[in-house]
Amino acid sequence: MGVIVRDMNLKVSLPAPIKRKVQNEIQRILKPTFFKDIPLSDIADKIKSFNVYLIDGDGTDWSGFLTGRDGRADFDLAYNGLYVKNAMFHMTWHKMESGNYEVIGYIS
């Protein structure tokens, strides 16, 4: 997608009602808990409907790989084109012997 936040010095708080809606959608996606693949793109696509984006440190749409049998990732957020100062998306995963991933994610 490209640049989401043009000036990382301009910051906004994620409004509580939006934060709750985003959190509810994340939990709806992750409710099964066990997945063949880590559903990060499903989460990112869904929260965009609330004008919330996962971003890299330079303000661009997040891109990258999640690697390893076990891991944790913390993602900065943008809301309406501004860097969110009061919330992040956190996700952990563990690949079980079955080959499925146990995935937990939340907005803090």
Image (cartoon, rainbow, N blue to C red):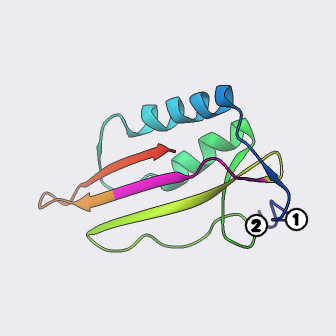
Q: Position of residue 12 (x, y in %)?
A: 79, 47
Q: Is residue 48 above or below residue 17?
A: below
**Residue 95 is one of the magenta-drawn residues:** no
Relative placement, left or right, of 29 versus 1 is left
Quarter holding the N terminus is: bottom right
In space, the residues marked 2 and 1 are separated at their CA atoms by 7 Å
Residue that carries the numbered disc 1 in the rendered image: 6
Are circles 2 and 1 on residues that touch, CB within 8 Å? yes
Q: Position of residue 51 (x, y in %)?
A: 75, 42
Q: Position of residue 16 (x, y in %)?
A: 65, 29
Looking at marks 2 and 1 on the same chain, the residue that comes earlier in the sequence is marked by 1
Disc 1 residue type? Arg
**Residue 84 is one of the magenta-drawn residues:** yes
- Determine if residue 38 is in view: no
Given residues 11 and 24, the one toward you in this image is: 11
Q: Residue 13 sits in which quadrant?
A: top right
Label 1 Cα crowd, 10 Å radius (few <14 / some 14-19 / many 20+) = few
Residue that carries the numbered disc 2 in the rendered image: 59
Q: Position of residue 24 (x, y in %)?
A: 51, 29
Majority SS type along the magenta span: strand
Disc 2 residue type? Gly
